[in-house]
Image: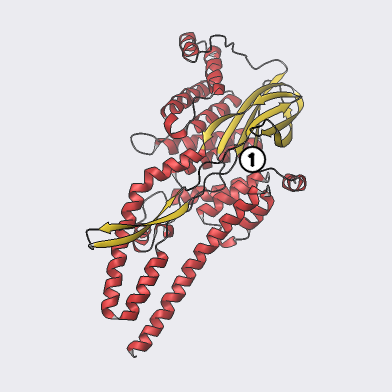
Amino acid sequence: MSIEAGGGICSRILLAVLALYLGGCATYSEQAGSMRDNLLIGRADLAQATAEKEDENKEDVLACLNKGMLRRMTNDFTGSNEIFEIAKQHMEALYGISVTDVAGSIAINDAVRDYKGDRYEQVLLHAYMAMNYLQLGEYDSARVEILQADVKMMEWGEEPDEDPYVRYFAGMIYEALGEEDQALVSYRKARDIYVATRNEQRIEVPLMLKRDLLRVLASQGLWDEYRQLKSEFGMVNFKPRKLGGNFGELIVVLNNGLAPIRTESAIMTFSAEVQGNLRIAFPLYEAEPAMLNSARLNISGKHFPLETVENIDSLARQALDDEMPMIMTRAIARAVLKHETQKQATEQHALAGFLMTVTNLATERADTRSWSTLPQQIEMARVMLPTGQQQVSIELVNAAGRVVDSIDAAVDIQPKQRTFLTRHWVAPVPLEAFKTAKK
């Protein structure tokens, strides 16, 4: 075979591989963008339809995470947990370091690595599965998920990577099951973690948590700690109210907004190894956090504010910052390797060198994957209500104090019991779209 013929075959193969690779990237990016666009116009049903079309992605962790969240948004809590369970199993299988993964990320780019989620995503998966079980009335199953989250948080090295909201939420589940001792342990841990992660999460210890901690301490008769924390919190007039009589408690969890989405940037950096400049690509969160509407409950004309208990936007940015040194290390090593392959190909044949250069430039892409259907923030409220059927409205209020949208629900309050209501809000929902999503 002539050099020219060999070069022609080589070029066709490289271009076909390149087209398939870029086509796959485009498909994923377009699907993620389409999902978010539909959510931003209040059409969770259309976003779900887009995600569910791709049957070949049923074993992809990120596809499962997004499908599970979208099923939640359309109130398919059973279906949500079915697909979340698949994601969880694959995350566990990918937990160990894969030699193939590392080799692929060095040879091509980080996006070829199997996606197992950042730490905060892995923990929140258990929290969302627990929320689904609570909506289904399966409180024991919710407890199992929270215990699994606890194991996950404690297994990351000598300093556990703990999420304050998940600890707080666990306490609520324990209380709902009558396990007050366990609830107290969780509330204490949550308070300590909120203090420790104040700079990363940009959240102070929620007032709601302070009240819960004091209330359970009083119930347990731990008066020394009760008085100490009451003074520390500056809540000298606080009086614990015990759940009883013809009252129950409603716990509302609102998933507000959308988590930030990663974009790609590239720079030229000097490499002493090749004595020249190399191009490397890396992910970043370019857009600033969105300004969210505040939320409140409206029950029989009385308003109750929701408090922010989790800042996922901050968690995502912090996770990327923590990972950036390794991302840049791999990117530089990859650029050096690609430079050498280009050099060797050029020495063998000019056309081969040109094609290798084109291929290396095209495949130098940043890994912009993330669980993009997560909310920007999680907000909560706890309200004692008379037993019986109650009409609840979660109102979204803009900076001018105007209600821009509301989510209505009927809840059945049982005496001395705790009832959970979890909902999502992304954008003002047109009436017809809201009715569709409720079906």
Task: Give amino acid for label 1.
Answer: His
The residue located at (49%, 34%) in the rendering is 147
Front-lying residue, 406 or 371: 406
Residue 67 at x, y percent in the picture: 59, 51
Label 1: which secondary element: strand
Identify residue for label 1: 424
Q: Is residue 302 left or right of residue 215?
A: right
| Mark 1 neighbour class, 10 Å CA radius: few under 14, some 14 to 19, many 20 or more | many
Which residue occupies the extreme bottom position in the image?
1
Front-lying residue, 381 or 187: 381
Q: Quadrant of residue 423?
A: top right
Residue 137 at x, y percent in the picture: 66, 35
Q: Is residue 332 left or right of residue 71?
A: left
Q: Is residue 116 above or below residue 135?
A: below
Residue 50 at x, y percent in the picture: 63, 57
Which residue occupies the extreme front position in the image?
400
Q: Is residue 313 above or below residue 188?
A: below
Query: Which coloring applies here?
Result: secondary structure
The residue located at (29%, 61%) in the rendering is 277
Front-lying residue, 214 or 174: 214
> Would residue 170 be seen by someone viewing this image from the given angle?
yes
> Would residue 367 be seen by someone viewing this image from the given angle?
no
Q: Is residue 362 above or below residue 1?
A: above
Q: Quadrant of residue 365?
A: bottom left
Q: Is residue 2 above or below residue 215?
A: below
Q: The N terminus appears in which quarter of the rendering?
A: bottom left
Q: Is residue 78 left or right of residue 340?
A: right
